[in-house]
Image (cartoon, rainbow, N blue to C red):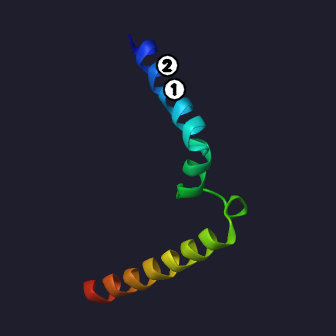
Amino acid sequence: MILRHTLKKFLIIIIRDVYTGTHTADKMRNTSKYATPALHPPKINKILRQNKKENERLNKKKLLRNE
């Protein structure tokens, strides 16, 4: 039963990838928070850098508020 469910999900992903012309693995790799910078196109790198700066700024605010 579990195997059938897994195969069904796998087939749906393959069919969707073929139909849309994109690869789910690529999407997952590009959106993963653990992805290495080498895998990202420059635009995504820029967004990740901005997010990192934003998070650092928010963390500083939290630390100041907690003191």
Looking at the image, residue 40 lies above or below residue 23: below
Name the residue at 41% across, 18% down. Answer: 5
Q: Are marks 2 and 1 in contact (CB under 8 Å)?
A: yes
Name the residue at 43% across, 85% down. Answer: 57
Q: Quadrant of residue 48?
A: bottom right
Q: Secondary structure at mark 2?
A: helix
Name the residue at 61% across, 43% down. Answer: 23
Looking at the image, residue 20 lies above or below residue 33: above
Three-letter code, disc 2: Leu
**Looking at the figure, which quarter contains the C terminus?**
bottom left
- Residue 13, position as x, y percentages in the image: 51, 33
- Residue 28, position as x, y percentages in the image: 55, 49
Residue lying at the far top in this picture: please name it: 1
Q: Which mark is residue 10?
A: 1
Residue lying at the far front in this picture: please name it: 19
Residue lying at the far left in this picture: please name it: 66
Q: Which mark is residue 7?
A: 2
Q: Residues within 10 Å of mark 1 (few under 14, many from 20)?
A: few
Looking at the image, residue 21 lies above or below residue 51: above
Q: Is residue 27 left or right of residue 60?
A: right
Q: Is residue 58 left or right of residue 22?
A: left
11 or 61: nearer the viewer: 11
